[in-house]
Image (cartoon, coloured by chain):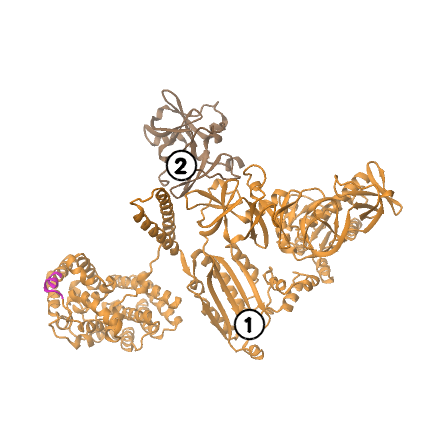
Chain colours: A orange, B brown
Amino acid sequence: MDDLLSEFLTETAESLAVLDVELVKLEQNPNDPALLGNIFRLVHTIKGTCGFLGLPRLEAVAHAGENVLGKVRDGELEVTPEAVSLILECLDRVRSLMGTLEQTEAEPAGEDSALINRLNALADGVGAAEPAATSAPPAASSLYDRVGGLAAIDAIVEVFYGSVVADEQLKGYVADINLDILQAGQRAFLGGLIGGPASEREAAQASAHRGFVTAAMEPQDVAAVDEYLRAALAALEVPADAAETVMGLIAASRPDAAGSAVQAEAPSTSSPTIDMPATAEAPGEAPEREREAAKPAASTAGKPGEAEEGTKDSAVANQSIRVNVDLLENLMTMVSELVLTRNQVLQILRTQKDSEFAAPLQRLNHVTSELQEGVMKTRMQPIGNAWAKLPRLVRDLAHDLGKKIDLQMIGADTELDRQVLEMIKDPLTHMVRNSADHGLETPEERRRRKKPDTGKITLNAYHEGGHIIIEISDDGRGLALEKIKAKALQNGIATQAELDDFTVQQVQQLVFRPGFSTADKVTSVSGRGVGMDVVKTNIEKIGGTIELRSTEGRGSTFVIKIPLTLAIVSALIVECAGERFAIPQISVVELVRISANSDNSVERIKDTPVLRLRNRLLPLVSLREMLHIGEGDDAEDSFIVVTQVGTHSFGMIVDRVFDTEEIVVKPVAPILRHIEIFSGNTILGDGSVIMILDPNGIAISSGQMNLAEAVVADVATHRDHRGEERVPLLLFRAGDGAPKAVPLALVARLEEIDLATVERSNGVCVVQYRGQLMPLISISADHQIGETGKQPILVFSDRDRSMGLAVDAILDIVEDRLAVELSTDEPGRIGSAIIAGHATDIIDAGYYLTQAFRDWFGTAEGDGGDGKRVLLIDDSPFFRNLLAPLLSVAGYDVTTAESAAKALMLHEAGEDFDVIISDIEMPGMNGFEFAQTVKKGTRWQNTPMVALSSHSSPRDIDRGRAVGFNDYVAKFDRDALLQTLSESLMDVRGAA
Amino acid sequence: MTADEPKARTTAGAEVEAAGEMQDYVSMTIGGQLFGVPVLKVQDVLGTQRITRIPLAPPEVAGSLNLRGRIVTAIDVRLRLGLPPRPESETAMSVVIDQGGELYSLLVDSVGEVLSLRVRDFERNPPNLDPRWRDFSEGIHRLKQSLLVVLDVARLLQIGRAEAA
């Protein structure tokens, strides 16, 4: 059944139940405006929903009812029992229509004009004047009223069935029947019998029963039934005379009583106390009839089916109840305990062969497993719930955008945890909206492209290996690569040079960058500043991933992969130094077995372990070291758990890998929450407590092992924001280990010198070079410069001073992205990166410069800087590390900040600088915004500012100047930077 | 269990007086010293348990254990009190305490009987008490043979926070 429909049925059934109660209350307190307001609202909601779902018959009925209630609310009508009855009748009609709706998913044929006319008549004020015409009998002294009205009948039926079910003898008659249905039927029957507000439904009921009067009970059973009914009447304090009349009516309606068409056709006009007995059958036999009725109803449509319609209180409503989530959580905990206990018992049993407990325990085992599954299922909801509002959304969108859209939803019954469901609702809506707005073309455009007018958006959900996959695809125009490129350029997300090198996939990935939207114009539908980057973030927040496939002109598909549930995760159990840990399966990419003799072995750069994995260098984290557990080093034979955190992969070295287990994540105790590498703990099947590792925390933590504080977070952002930036790098070999690289821009010249010309002065190797003495520095202290032969050197120049870095061999000049994968605190190294497919140490040129200059020239002469204070803001640790020493060497007193926000904190802290150098592209506040902020009347507003950027198009420079930068310097252009700095300082001096 | 538990850091005196003339304590020994915890705070007393170590946790945190499906954090009271670690040969007993909805197990050398003590035998901490102990002690009960230190469980479990402050 359509989920929207079933939700409607459930909700409406609930509303109807409330309405029944409230209306009865209203009858007793006709002047309670709150009560009336509530009733009106409920009916109004029902009407509204029916209209929305396109159920005209229901809507018409509800509308007529609402009309009456509206008049009552406005004081134009008085609350009379007649009015209430009529409204109840109206509700009953709604209920009966819903019954059919539930079975056939369509409204039954027919019309309700009689009822609606009566309602309208009542609304117009005629109803009260012609009570006889409007069904309800003038009630004052009727049997119905003497019994106590609807509420009393309800109670009588309740008590009566309580007794019947308790009776051994009678139980059999009602065994197979849903009691609720039975009672509803019985209520209707009794109500009709004693002259309550009759309705067509009751009439149908009675006539249906009449067909089965021959199915009789044993006489003694009938007597017993009568007794119970009498008792029920007495229990509800029905006056004795009234009770007798009722019993008499029932007796008279026994099978031998003649059927009567009067009851069926004109109950409302008949005089209740006289006609009823002759027409209806014994209520005591009603259950029997019901059961019998149910059978033919299944096979023969028609009259019995008609009866069903009336009797069946919505089965959907009966099938679902609302339960507090806490209760479910509690149940979950209890079941976990049960499972653990079961496991223990099974463990004991295994040691005892031929135990008499074996069989029952086997059974216990199964039941427990099923119970566990069942309880876990209580948290699950079909994904269709998250989709329910999409058809309407798409319809409205299609209307607004003038497109024709067909929304197909496949796999709506795929279940996932309600918590996850809540969290993907918004991203899904956003993506469908995107598809409709950006993805699909207008009908004219589609025709031009020889596509059908109607665009198609398909949602497809299915399970795959413990995950839910949701695909959102459209057959629209696909991602326009050129448009994306243009947009990326325009928004400064990438440079032309970068874009030229990008693969199609890389270009497509740009849409996930912050501040990206391919829509030409901002529409009401999209373009509100939230884009795919938000969607991506939200999905990643729940441990999911999102991928994109698109063919220009053919359409796009987004594939979302999310875990089934947040509470229960599939986890890989590993062992390290005798301790077991769980790693969430979703972040585990693969397992690699390593041993000394195989192709896969751990290599080390300095002390940092890495693994060559399919032409990539995978940084490794030794759990043993990270957790400070166990003695000694990792064994040569161990396992690498390759883990992915965001876009970043790393491996964890563990001793052993066990099974995957479903675990229930429990938060760690408050006193342990500060340990960021654990995301929780859990109890395994064998009862032991085990910590759950958080790959995210480990990634952060492992960075911190090597590098000072904040840099780590920066490395991550660095990767995100500059991962694609390509710089020319000089590759060379020097000393042991991996090849080394330095940005080419920093190298003045490459020379080869004759070692014979090398002299030693003051303990330092020097060589005469261009009429000056140039110090030669070796790459590390233990790497000595040879005595003879040729020595290649890299010459770094600083104004009129130069230094040479002795290297073994110059390998290559390559252009590659400079993503420092592993950071280090070893002097002279910034870290390791994959350059041209090899693990490469990036050397810190600044370090060698200071070495040379400190030794040779003494401390900085300050010919340029004069100890001027410079604030350097750059989010990339690489550039900070690169520039800070350079500036120090040039005589500046350098303070660094990794973000504009940090810089502003320095401002707050009362720091003052002579010049500020700021990067432009930074996460958070970018350089332009920073300059604007500073220039807008802070204490720093007169401090010269120099922008530093890898984008130095005239447009950028203009923008930079517009926001207050004094100058704009390209990154890597060290001379220009120093020149600019001193000029900027001069300017200020001149101005002052 | 937690709902009607008296607020942890109400002064011991007030708590004791509110309870009338007598106050019941679960007695336990740690490093030869007799300690007591108000009986209402104690949820369970367990023998030796399998305890999972928690790497990187503060040293006083011995690990976690499974108490009927709930994860209980075990605190080594010896280390918390600045006493030498328990010799390998000796086993610990667990006194399980519910603190703010979280379960903690206090690892002690041994657990004795429940003592009903007269309120008038209760005294504040002597001023010369070891400062570390003074933090964790609500006061002292004079028994005939010995002295019983009433443990301030809330303070005892403020691991990390106290140090950070």
- Count of labels shown? 2
- The stretch of residues the image draws in magenta is A217-224
Q: CA distance from mark 1 to mark 2?
A: 62 Å
The x and y percentages for residue A975 are 79, 51
Q: Can you identify the residue that label 1 sits on? A: A476
Mark 1 packing: few (<14 Cα in 10 Å), some, or many (20+)? many
Q: Judge by depth and name the residue closer to the eye, A756 or A516.
A: A756
Q: Residue A893 location in percent, x, y?
A: 74, 43
Give the overall secondary structure of the magenta segment.
Answer: helix
Question: Which sits in the foreground, B93 or A83?
Answer: B93
Badge 2 marks a residue whose secondary structure is: strand
Q: Residue at x 52, y 65 (%)?
A: A431
Asked if residue A141 shows in the view, the reply is no
Relative to A339, residue A251 above or below: below
Q: Is residue B113 left or right of residue A295?
A: right
Q: Residue furthest right?
A: A771
Q: Marks 2 and 1: in contact by CB < 8 Å?
A: no
- Image position of A700 (left or right of B42): right
Q: Is residue A220 magenta?
A: yes
The residue singled out by tag 2 in the image is: B97
Q: Is residue A944 left or right of residue A18?
A: right
Q: Nearer the viewer, residue A829 or A102?
A: A829
Q: Tag 2: residue type?
A: Ile
The image quarter containing residue A489 is bottom right
Q: Which mark is residue A344?
A: none
Q: Position of residue A380 (x, y in %)?
A: 41, 57
